[in-house]
Image (tube, rainbow, N blue to C red):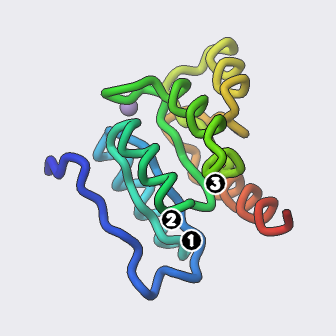
Amino acid sequence: MDSGNLWKPPSQADIKRPLILAVEDNEDNLDLLQTVLMLMDYSFVAARDGNTGLSIAQQYQPDLILLDMMLPDIEGIELAHQLKQNEQTKAIPIIAVTAMARAQDRERAINAGCNEYITKPYDMEELEGLIKHYLLNNDTV
Ligand code: MN
């Protein structure tokens, strides 16, 4: 299925649940994330490229962003920079997700403003733990 940059705005029933934005261009990864996040009872929006991710983040103020580092238009690192420089989005925690596992990649992601960095394929327990951690920390601010 190629649905381009189509995404669904949160429904009325979603409003009280934490909203998680996944910026990810791989459909299999998106399906997996959507399944996990729905099981965790979070609402979920997807962006399949960086510029769409930036505009959804600004418009919807998600509680957390899962950010793929390899996107079709701009690098995940660059998007993290932009999110952190924008008043509307700078407080949103970002978890970088990537297939690259080199130490310097992690450092680049953290330096760009990502709060955490995990490698694909996802360890679902690790991902769940991180999501809960950052949602909780955000709520207490
Ligand atoms: Mn990718």
Residue at figure coordinates x 45%, y 64% from the top left: 44
- Horizontal side of 30 relative to 41 (left or right) equals left
Q: Earlier in the sequence, mark 1 or mark 3?
A: 1
Q: Nearer the viewer, mark 1 or mark 3?
A: 1
Q: Judge the density around disc 2: few (<14), some (14-19), many (≥20) Cα neighbours within 10 Å.
A: some
- In the image, farthest residue toward the front: 87
Q: Position of residue 123 (x, y in %)?
A: 58, 45
Compute the Cα span from label 1 to label 2.
5 Å
Q: Judge the density around disc 1: few (<14), some (14-19), many (≥20) Cα neighbours within 10 Å.
A: few
Which of 52/94 is in front?
A: 52
Q: Secondary structure at mark 2?
A: helix
Q: Return the residue at label 3.
A: 125
Three-letter amino acid code at the position of disc 3: Glu
- Horizontal side of 117 relative to 73 (left or right) equals right
- In the image, farthest residue toward the bottom: 13
Q: Position of residue 45 (x, y in %)?
A: 41, 60
Q: Secondary structure at mark 1?
A: loop
Q: Return the residue at label 2.
A: 37
Q: Return the residue at label 1.
A: 40
51 over 111 or under it: above or below: below
Label 2 residue near ligand 1, CB within 8 Å: no
51 over 57 or under it: above or below: above
Do labels 1 and 2 touch, CB within 8 Å? yes
Compute the Cα span from label 2 to label 3.
12 Å
